[in-house]
Image: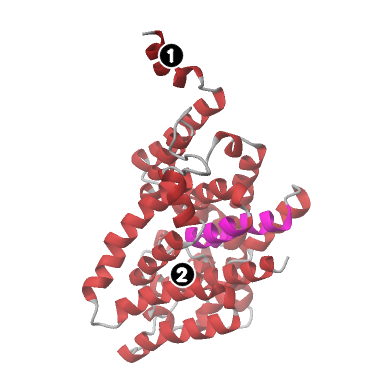
Amino acid sequence: MEQILNYFSAGIGSLSWQQVVMFVIGGILIWLATAKNYEPMLLLPIGFGAILVNLPLAVVLGTAEHPGALQILFDCGIMTELFPLLIFIGVGAMIDFTPLLERPWLLVFGLVAHSGIFIAALVAYYCFGFDLKEALSIGVIGAADGPTAIVVASKHAQNLLGQITVVAYSYMSLVPIIMPPVIKLLTTKKERRIRIQAKNKNIPKTALIIFPVAVTLVVSLVIPDAAALIGFLMFGNLIRECGVLEKLSKSAQNELSNIVTLLLGISVGASMTADKFLTPQTLLVMVLGLIAFAGDIVCGVLFAKFLNLFCKKENRLNPMIGACGISAFPMASRTVQKLALEEDDQNFILMHAVSANVSGQIGSVIIGGIILGFLSGV
């Protein structure tokens, strides 16, 4: 009888205050997902995974000789990049690149508006003592692209993978809250009221099919480390645009994305053990992630204002378009359109905003590939 009592009380007796704190953090993530609807598909499984992995004497991680379920999912799905890449197929299937093909010059915002990545990385490296790989991995939070952040962190900052993933997806869900005050700080009411004439063009179906293939070839040849990221993203888009795989396109957007997101979330939760997560670095990652996000918005808006210096009055851009260069699609473009309507209920800049927004998705992958290539040589 005593042995039985000892067995059932062993778990409670082994419970540490750090593990209790992680239970609370996991509960907060679940609350944010369910009560506030912040990235529920990811934050809920991450929160539950964080609770599972911190259970005392639990075997969900297993041992090196006999890995448990969570460890197997983590090794097979995260460390091999499988889950992020499969999610990219679903993301690609959701994106319509027609607005960008109508205004290809807006692709520049997808690159410029990710400058916050490097601002945050410099702050992390020079001000807070992170090494170069950790600093750039933290900076990639500013890509507003969860899969890219996970791929970079899993290769070069495994000790910060949990923090980076949670912060990246949390801030992505907070785009409608983060963007407006930054934009309003940098623009005048008059600038936010600028109207842009939407001139839609007839993009042939052939061009929509050629586009993902051409982008994959060009980006992969110039930036080999981005080949997998851009390839899976554009493969998903090709499924969408080819016109003969409608069922697969819908499956990629729904069933595939949902299942893989759940598995990715609970796998990332497996990296959130108390000894790794309850450190001062976690708070720093949160601060630096916010710097990266805000830096992206600032650089995008200021670049749009810079371009307006060389434009005729009737051709000026609404500088809020620049903020859409982050790849938080489609939240960024919706947020900017909402701001435009608040200032002028007849100001419709959504098509330009979406063009910049989808270019941000491509830009995040390109910059992610550049960082991967650079860090591989460090």
Q: Is residue 82 left or right of residue 242?
A: right
Residue type at mark 1: give it.
Asn
Magenta highlight on residue 52: no
Q: Is residue 87 left or right of residue 65?
A: left
Q: Residue at x 65, y 42 (%)?
A: 281
Q: Residue at x 48, y 83 (%)?
A: 215
Figure disc tally: 2
Percent coordinates x, y for residue 136 in the rendering:
66, 59
Closer to viewer: mark 2 or mark 1? 1
**Other residues around mark 1 within 10 Å, as few (<14) / some (14–19) / many (≥20):** few
Q: Which residue is mark 2?
A: 357
- Looking at the image, residue 55 lies above or below residue 241: above
- The quadrant the C terminus occupies is bottom right
- Looking at the image, residue 306 lies above or below residue 37: below
In the rendered image, the residue lying farthest to the top is 2
Q: Which residue is mark 1?
A: 6
Instruction: Identify the element where label 1 is drawn.
Output: helix
Residue type at mark 2: give it.
Asn
Percent coordinates x, y for residue 138 in the rendering:
62, 54
In which quarter of the view is residue 110 placed?
Answer: bottom right
Q: Which residues are magenta?
A: 131-155
Percent coordinates x, y for residue 171 in the rendering:
50, 51
